[in-house]
């Protein structure tokens, strides 16, 4: 006896996941991952603070970009939610009527965590290449690293890797030096547990 055919996942299925999760559709599979950790959130805030003013707002840099945090992007039948996506202003499609963007970004950044690293590095990187995203950054807050990739002949080429407190000038945001040390927070002492009635 043959197995029944799997029902194809569609956009409405994203509404079935808990509100404290991030939902994506990758190669027909519904993927739900937990909200980011503190390390992840800190790296995201630091990246936004470093590239937002010079590239999104044009303060101390060339401007010319629309950069969004956790946008839904439709790549064919896939709905992906990168940590950051950026479009050069002349390519930005404007605000869509749907929840997702269908115009391919010029740059994507994924901030890796133990629950997302495998999908980010393997499945999502392959989709980004297939749809010709030009630049991809991978930030790993646990290893304190930043990797820079550029698409060339439909393949990702690793341009550079940075770590710890490096000063970074990286495509496509090479006009401004980034302070990578701002992306990491050293762990403080453990907080004592507080119990009721004490």
Image (spheres, rainbow, N blue to C red):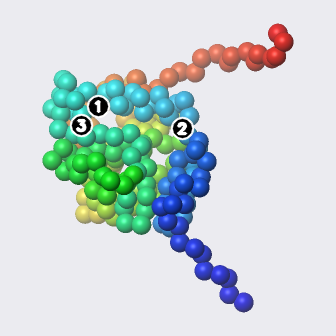
Image location of residue 49, percent across then percent down: 34, 26
* Number of residues whose C-alpha sits closer than 10 Å to that of mark 1, classed few (under 14), some (14–19) or many (20 or more): many
Mark pair 2, 3: CA separation:
25 Å
Question: Residue 36 has which mark?
Answer: 2
Q: Quadrant of residue 55?
A: top left
Q: Residue at x 22, y 29 (%)?
A: 57
Of the two numbered discs 1 and 3 on the same chain, state the one appearing first in sequence.
1
Q: Secondary structure at mark 2?
A: loop
The quarter of the rendered structure image containing the N terminus is bottom right
- Tell whether 72 sits left or right of 196: left
Image location of residue 170, percent across then percent down: 27, 37
Q: Residue at x 23, y 52 (%)?
A: 93
- The residue nearer to you, when weighing 194 against 101, is 101
The quarter of the rendered structure image containing the C terminus is top right
Q: Nearer the viewer, mark 1 or mark 3?
A: 1
Instruction: Looking at this view, name the residue that lies furthest to the right.
Output: 197
For the residues labelled 1 and 3, say whether their Cβ atoms are less than 8 Å apart: yes
Q: Residue at x 43, y 58 (%)?
A: 79
Mark pair 2, 1: CA separation:
20 Å
- Tell whether 195 sits left or right of 24: right
* Number of residues whose C-alpha sits closer than 10 Å to that of mark 3, classed few (under 14), some (14–19) or many (20 or more): some
Instruction: Looking at this view, name the residue that lies furthest to the bottom.
Output: 1
Q: Nearer the viewer, mark 2 or mark 3?
A: 2
Q: Residue at x 49, y 55 (%)?
A: 24
Of the two numbered discs 2 and 1 on the same chain, state the one appearing first in sequence.
2
Question: In the rendered view, would you say 61 is above or below 133?
Answer: above
What residue is shown with label 3? 173
| Residue 114 visible | no
Instruction: Looking at this view, name the residue that lies furthest to the top.
Output: 198
Image location of residue 143, percent across then percent down: 50, 35
Question: Residue 51 has which mark?
Answer: 1
């Amino acid at each position: 006896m043959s197995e029944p055919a799997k029902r194809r996942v569609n956009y409405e299925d994203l509404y079935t996941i808990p509100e404290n999760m991030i939902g994506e559709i990758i190669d027909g599979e519904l993927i739900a991952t937990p909200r980011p950790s503190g390390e992840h959130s800190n790296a995201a805030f630091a990246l936004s603070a470093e590239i937002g003013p010079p590239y999104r707002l044009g303060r101390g840099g060339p401007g010319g970009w629309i950069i969004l945090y956790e946008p839904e992007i439709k790549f064919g039948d896939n709905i992906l939610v990168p940590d950051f996506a950026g479009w050069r202003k002349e390519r930005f499609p404007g605000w869509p009527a749907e929840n997702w963007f269908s115009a391919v970004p010029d740059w994507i950044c994924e901030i890796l965590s133990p629950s997302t690293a495998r999908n980010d590095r393997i499945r999502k990187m392959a989709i980004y290449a297939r749809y010709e995203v030009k630049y991809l950054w991978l930030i790993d807050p646990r290893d304190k690293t930043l990797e820079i990739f550029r698409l060339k002949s439909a393949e990702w080429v690793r341009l550079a890797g940075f770590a710890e407190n490096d000063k970074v000038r990286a495509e496509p945001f090479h006009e401004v030096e980034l302070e990578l040390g701002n992306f990491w927070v050293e762990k403080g002492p453990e907080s004592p547990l507080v119990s009721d009635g004490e």
